[in-house]
């Protein structure tokens, strides 16, 4: 029987981190720290009788990943198992954001566009060009309302010709951000239509995944996007979820974590993610 994405996530991460190392050369994970150990990353545990392993289980982190995260501190474990980085440069190739309907793609894209406009280093650069391909009712109106204060141009990408024309006639050095239609990764037709748009304009694909999803479902989504060339992901709705183990499960399938969307505010609503920030988020349980 073929392994599921969640079963292979830890193996893929180990291979990516270790390069050509054989299984015998990969060090075995250390046991998860017990309750007498120092709090990971200097953060006090939210409940004194819980171990770090207990907390990771509460977040629904898959057991193989819990073992892989074991070590000196939770932050060290996250840094060893996951990748953290920046989104691809949207001035070099269009940056397309994919995910399920309601995943937060539109809001994340609006935050990134506003962030670009407000950055001092981009004050003399052309504004981002937004291509809206998501035809969900109200999606274009929402995006227009969010970006109206920033005078950012938006094009409805209803056909391949419109997409190609928009890319061909952009200003020199102008970034292009694409809001892809919501998809279901279990539907070959849905995924095929999304990839046609991505390939039509030579875009770089990035996943937007909401926190709070089932970890197995998140791993399936992360794996599906990684198989289609995505290398990065944005964790959305982190302010609306308690359990965030799905974010870890998806990222462990080969996607680099870039930002966490932690607020509904357009300005300042994105936080660059790293191992320490994610460790703190995991250890902060709802009261």
Image (cartoon, rainbow, N blue to C red):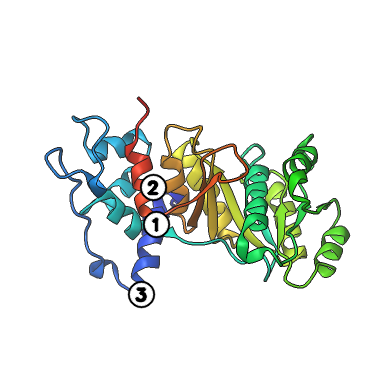
Quadrant of residue 13 within the rendered picture:
bottom left
Residue linked to disc 1 = 82
Q: What is the x, y in percent for residue 7?
A: 40, 49
* Residue at (32% x, 43% y) in the render: 63
Tell whether label 2 touches label 1 (CB within 8 Å).
yes
Q: Nearer the viewer, residue 160 or 119?
A: 119
Q: Nearer the viewer, residue 121 or 114?
A: 121
For label 2, the crowd category at 10 Å Cα-Cα, with few meaning under 14, some 14 to 19 and many 20 or more, is some
Which is closer to the viewer, label 1 or label 3? 1
Screen quadrant of the C terminus: top left
Q: Is residue 124 left or right of residue 31?
A: right
> Which residue bears the numbered disc 2?
278
Relative vertical location of residue 241 with respect to residue 225 in this rendering, above or below: above
The residue under label 3 is 20
Measured in 3D between alpha carbons, the distance from the residue under mark 1 to the one under mark 2, in whole angstroms, is 11 Å
Asked if the residue at tag 3 contacts the one at tag 1, i.e. Cβ–Cβ closer than 8 Å, the answer is: no
Instruction: Tell which circle, 1 or 3, labels the residue nearer the N-terminal end.
Output: 3
Q: How many marks?
A: 3
Q: Residues within 10 Å of mark 1 (few under 14, many from 20)?
A: many
- Which one is closest to the eye, mark 3 or mark 2? 2
């Amino acid at each position: 029987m073929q392994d599921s994405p969640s079963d292979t996530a830890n193996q893929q991460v180990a291979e990516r981190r270790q390069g050509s190392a054989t299984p015998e050369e990969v060090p075995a994970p250390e046991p998860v720290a017990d309750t007498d150990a120092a709090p990971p990353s200097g953060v006090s545990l939210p409940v004194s009788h819980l171990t770090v392993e207990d907390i990771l289980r509460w977040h629904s982190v898959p057991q193989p990943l819990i073992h892989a995260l074991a070590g000196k501190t939770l932050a060290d474990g996250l840094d060893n198992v996951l990748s953290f980085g920046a989104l691809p440069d949207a001035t070099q190739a269009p940056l397309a954001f994919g995910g399920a309907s309601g995943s937060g793609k539109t809001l994340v894209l609006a935050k990134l566009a506003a962030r670009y406009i407000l950055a001092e280093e981009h004050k003399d650069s052309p504004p981002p060009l937004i291509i809206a391909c998501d035809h969900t009712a109200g999606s274009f109106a929402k995006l227009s309302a969010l970006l109206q204060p920033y005078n950012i141009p938006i094009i409805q990408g209803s056909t391949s010709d419109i997409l190609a024309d928009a890319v061909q006639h952009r200003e020199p050095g102008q970034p292009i951000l694409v809001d892809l239609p919501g998809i279901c990764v279990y539907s070959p037709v849905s995924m095929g239509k999304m990839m046609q748009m991505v390939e039509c304009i030579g875009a770089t694909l990035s996943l937007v995944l909401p926190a709070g999803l089932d970890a197995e479902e998140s791993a399936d989504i992360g794996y599906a996007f990684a198989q289609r060339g995505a290398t990065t992901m944005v964790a959305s709705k982190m302010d609306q979820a308690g359990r965030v183990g799905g974010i870890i499960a998806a990222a462990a399938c080969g996607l680099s974590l870039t930002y966490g969307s932690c607020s509904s505010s357009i300005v300042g609503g994105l936080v660059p993610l790293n191992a320490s920030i994610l460790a703190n988020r995991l250890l902060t349980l709802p009261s």
